[in-house]
Image (cartoon, rainbow, N blue to C red):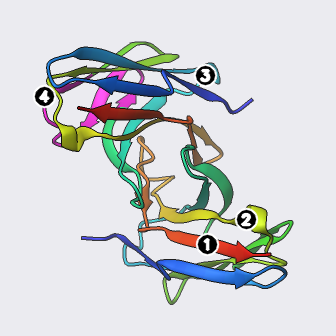
Amino acid sequence: QQQVKQSPQSLIVQKGGISIINCAYENTAFDYFPWYQQFPGKGPALLIAIRPDVSEKKEGRFTISFNKSAKQFSLHIMDSQPGDSATYFCAASRGRGSTLGRLYFGRGTQLTVWP
Amino acid sequence: DTEVTQTPKHLVMGMTNKKSLKCEQHMGHRAMYWYKQKAKKPPELMFVYSYEKLSINESVPSRFSPECPNSSLLNLHLHALQPEDSALYLCASRRKRGGVDTQYFGPGTRLTVL
């Protein structure tokens, strides 16, 4: 059973446009929602993360929007650049309630930004 | 410093070989993880070590044998692998601060089983 559902599977955006990736979860025990960026042949790198006590977090061109009642969160990449072309994974974990910090990943979104 | 290192970067092995993957972190993190990742898929959890003790084994076949000799080092011993075990093997360590968990991934070992 997929604990975190992610869409779209692939996304093509023009340079300068906005990329939006959506995720949804069911387990209300999740209290930490990170996004990872992965380039081909590399390990995932933490991009940005949010706790459910805030509705939005912004770091540079990357913003997470969080809707606790809908159990959804999304990543917005403003002014998308060709260097943003990568696979993005959303994830969820039970930070406070877990001694192991297990991450549940979405299936990933392959983003391509055309110059 | 949030670096997790993994060696080797690439490994090709036959089905009868025995090899080991190594992971190291010097951030003082006390939880470490092995993941397997196939192309275009998310990382799939294999093992979790917490304070050098194996805490989670996700029903991984016995041909994969993890070892945590100390708090900075994690090994994955491989024996009699199958071609379908070819994948990117990722190590991660976890920082827990203020109730926030963050996992930091290494660059991975690209394993090819012939």
- Vertical side of B54 occupied by A12: above or below: below
Q: Could you tell me how many numbered marks the image carries?
A: 4
Neighbourhood count class around disc 2 (C-alpha, 10 Å): few under 14, some 14–19, many 20 upward:
some
Please report, as a chain letter, where disc 1 is located. A
The disc, 2 or 1, on the residue closer to the chain's N-terminal end is: 2
Amino acid under disc 2: Asp
Neighbourhood count class around disc 1 (C-alpha, 10 Å): few under 14, some 14–19, many 20 upward:
many
Residue hosting label 1:
A111
- Vertical side of A79 occupied by B23: above or below: above
What numbered label is drawn on residue B28?
A: 3
Neighbourhood count class around disc 3 (C-alpha, 10 Å): few under 14, some 14–19, many 20 upward:
few
> Can residue A53 be seen?
no
Q: Nearer the viewer, residue A72 or A20?
A: A20
Residue hosting label 2:
A84
Q: CA distance from mark 3 to mark 2?
A: 31 Å
Q: Position of residue A59 (x, y in %)?
A: 82, 64
Residue depicted at 55% across the width and 61% down the height: A32
Amino acid under disc 3: Gly
Residue depicted at 43% across the width and 35% down the height: B110
Q: Which residues are magenta?
A: B49-65
Report the residue that reaches farthest toward the top. B69
Amino acid under disc 1: Leu
Tell whether A76 sits left or right of A37: right
> Can residue A113 be seen?
yes
Residue hosting label 4:
B62
